[in-house]
Every structure is written in C-alpha cells, then in structure tokens.
Amino acid sequence: MAFADTPAPPYWAVLFTSRRNSGDAEGYARMADAMSALAPSQPGYLGIESVRGADGVGITVSYWRDEASIAAWKRLSAHVAAQQAGHERWYEDFVVRVARVERAYTMAGSPREGLEPGEA
C-alpha cells in the first residue's frame, strides 16, 4: 500500500471501514478498481489509502479538498451504483466517518506537511 500524497492541512478525510461477505469477490474487485480509477478524476480528490485483512475487514481512507467535493463524490451516479451494489451484494456491515484533518506529519517530519517530527 502506498501513502496518499496529501497537501498540507487542512483537508478532509472519509474513513470507510467495512466487513466483506464471502460472495462475488470478482464483482467486488472489478467495482473497487472502477471506483479507484474514477475518483482521481473528481474535483477536490487528493488521494486514497486502503487495506483489507484476511478476515474481510477493510479500511479505505479517501482525502478531499473540502466537504463540497465529498458531497459531489457521494452523489456521482457511478458511485451511487457502487454503494447500492455494496449494500446488496458485498458488505456484511460498514461505517463511514468524515473528518477534517487539522494536522499531519510523517516519521521524517516532511516539510510538505509543515510539522516537525513528534509535533502534534
């Protein structure tokens, strides 16, 4: 997994934690690939980080310039169709959280993030 290349804060994050069921793994993979390809073309998109464990629990964090960009992504027809398919076919459960990122720093204290190591 690569880290998203986000700008200096503030910006927004959508945290999507899900538990997959065992059905239609190929369909899920195709839809996940399609959404991962579509999201970067959306205004305000900054990046994504995603992992899934062998137990089916996954966390995807997408980063956005502002709340309006998140709302536009949520309403995008292709994304609405993906959400519906997720409800009907792929997820046992999920939680969506939306947060404003106020501070961010790296182990090396990346100057791009504007903070020194250990500064919070």
Image: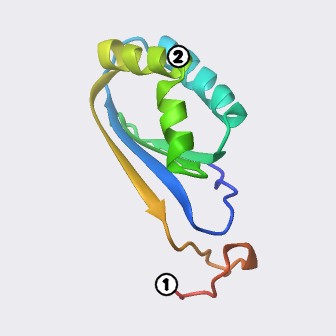
Q: In what element is the residue under mark 2?
A: helix
Q: Extreme front residue here?
A: 68
> Which residue is at 54% across, 25% downward?
32
Q: Is residue 53 above or below residue 83?
A: below
Q: Quadrant of residue 39?
A: top right
23 to the left or right of 51: left
* Residue type (three-letter) at the residue carrying disc 2: Ser
Q: In what element is the residue under mark 1?
A: loop
Disc 1 designates what residue? 120
Give the color scheme: rainbow, by chain, secondary structure or one colour: rainbow
> Which residue is at 63% across, 83% downward?
115
Per the rendering, the mark at residue 77 is 2
40 to the left or right of 54: right
Per the rendering, the mark at residue 93 is none
x and y percentages locating residue 3 in the rendered image: 64, 55
Q: Is residue 73 above or below residue 48?
A: above
> Which residue is at 74% across, 73% downward?
112
Q: Nearer the viewer, residue 32 or 62?
A: 62
Q: Is residue 34 above or below residue 1?
A: above
